[in-house]
Amino acid sequence: MSVSEQQSGARTPGRLYGVGLGPGDPSLMTVRAVQVIAEADVVAYHSARHGRSIARAIAAGHLRADHIEEALVYPVTTESTDHPGGYRGALDDFYEEAAARLAAHLDAGRTVAVLSEGDPLFYGSYQHMHKRLAHRYPTEVVPGVTSINAAAARLGRPLVEADEVLTVLPGTLPEEELTARLAATDSAVVMKLGRTFPAVRRAMERSGRLPEARYVERATMAGERTGALEDVDPASVPYFSVAVVPSRVAERDVSGDVSRARGEVAHAPEDVSGGAPEDVSGAPGEAAHAPGDAPGDAPGTVTGDVVVVGTGPAGPLWLTPESRGALAAADDLVGYTTYLDRVPVRPGQLRHGSDNKVESERAELALDLARRGRRVAVVSGGDPGVFAMATAVLEVAAEERYRAVPVRVLPGVTAANAAAAKAGAPLGHDYAVLSLSDRLKPWEVIAERLRAAAAADLVLALYNPGSRSRTWQVGKARDLLLEHRSPDTPVVLGRDVGGPEESVRTVRLADLDPAEVDMRTILLIGSSQTRTVRRTDGAATVWTPRRYPEG
């Protein structure tokens, strides 16, 4: 102590350590953790009311007789409490009291080591002391091996490889949230099982991850247990257990990389015509593979499945968790090359890209691959059921030879919904959706439907308004609608919504210029009730009231 400190009576505060002990096996403690415990004056650890502390048991071989021990005993271990602030209030009071006890030692100049299973700042109890004390005292956190790393090691399964994403989830999340997050990620670890296990298992099953999921209980500790999650009795699951969905890439490698096991499949040719999306003619074209050339065994030997995935109008931000998960789980991706380019490349996955005018051929390829036991995702823009790939796949799947192949359709954000959201809420009341393409139906049918929708005063969402080879339909549609609508009717032109060249403008129906419309544009044409308001920042907001005037 310095002379000034002696004269003032001040004392140099002690140092706080958060010490990670690893997953349970004392031999997995770090050298630094052992050093800190040896040098500490005070060793603190959390425990339940029964007084037994797992953290203390791990570090027991390094505790001295002269250590001051502070047992931080939780007042509650379930959410049942008569505390006026409820469970959270009881814990907050406990943490404040525990921090005050440690602060008294630190103020007295003692070094305090707070023990923590795993890593102190990963779901660790120490973090509550850290938040209350680290800004007041010199502090060091000693990292430890987490239960996640221990579980992967005991399973002997990689967690993530290449560009895979690992998601760590507490089992206490709502079941719907767990399901969505499990469906969307590559690999996952679910912590805090115990009483949450039944909901976690249901979430695994609903997200399609149950067959992959593994269970690890008390990793590296006495009583360790591992196995398939679906085989675990829910009544036997303690809190100190985790559910693991390991690396899909590693799993493909273990089971035989698809390119080696099934035969290498050529990627799509680079010189596809790049025809306009959604404007499909069904005309013959060059597919990446002929239907009979799918790799693998003879048709009908094994059945995989086909899922038609809507990617929304642009990139990953528009994907639903379910769609994201289906794309990650697929062995093969089939689709128009422009849409395939939106999907990240994953090791082991095969991609079969083609021109946009060979929908039936793509459907046949996908179904043939599935008949050979492949998990196939057919990639579609927007929503696959709106002028897109779902109909093409289901039409071919109706043939007798494909009746046994499971086919699912996953929804996506439609171009109409995306453009409407950017403009405001022009689809806020009844509306009709039409395609202006006359390649698959005669213009007379389109004109008749436009007249009927206009006469019914419906808002219109017009897909496929024009392309390089179709330049007159927009003008014809405008003139026809002007027979029923005011020239001032607002028209939203949404181009490349969600993409790098996004443009959303509102013009009068009378001012709609066909030259400004292409296949990347969708038109939203208001009803007699649709309103446009110019905001103070100059942007136009368009909406259609939900209430329609009587009479």
Image (cartoon, rainbow, N blue to C red):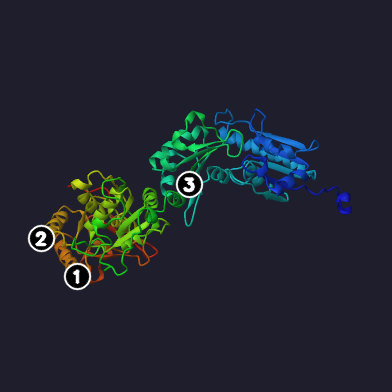
Q: Give the residue at mark 1.
A: 469
Vertical comparison of 55 with 282: above or below: above
The mark nearer the N terminus, 3 or 2, is 3
Identified at 89% across, 50% down, the residue is 7
> In the image, which disc is placed on residue 444?
2
> Does dot 1 land on a helix, a strand or a loop?
loop
**Amino acid type of the residue tagged 3 in the rendering:** Pro
| Residue 176 can be seen in this image | no
Q: How far apart, in angstroms, are the residues tagged by discs 1 and 3?
A: 49 Å
* Residue at image point 77% right, 47% down: 14
- For marks 2 and 1, give the one nearer the viewer: 1
Comparing labels 3 and 2, the label whose residue is closer to the camera: 3
Rendering quarter of residue 421: bottom left
Q: Which of the two labelled residues, at mark 1 and mark 3, occupies the earlier sequence position? A: 3
Do tag 2 and tag 1 residues touch (Cβ < 8 Å)?
Answer: no
- Residue drawn where x is 16% and y is 54% of the image: 453
Residue 200 in the image, given as x and y percentages of width and height: 46, 37
* Residue under numbered circle 3: 246
Q: Position of residue 61 (x, y in %)?
A: 73, 38
- Image position of 248 with respect to 57: above or below: below
Residue drawn where x is 20% and y is 47% of the image: 401
Image location of residue 32, percent across then percent down: 71, 49
Mark 2 or 1, nearer chain start = 2
The count of marks equals 3
Marks 1 and 3 close (CB-CB < 8 Å): no
Q: Amino acid at mark 1?
A: Ser
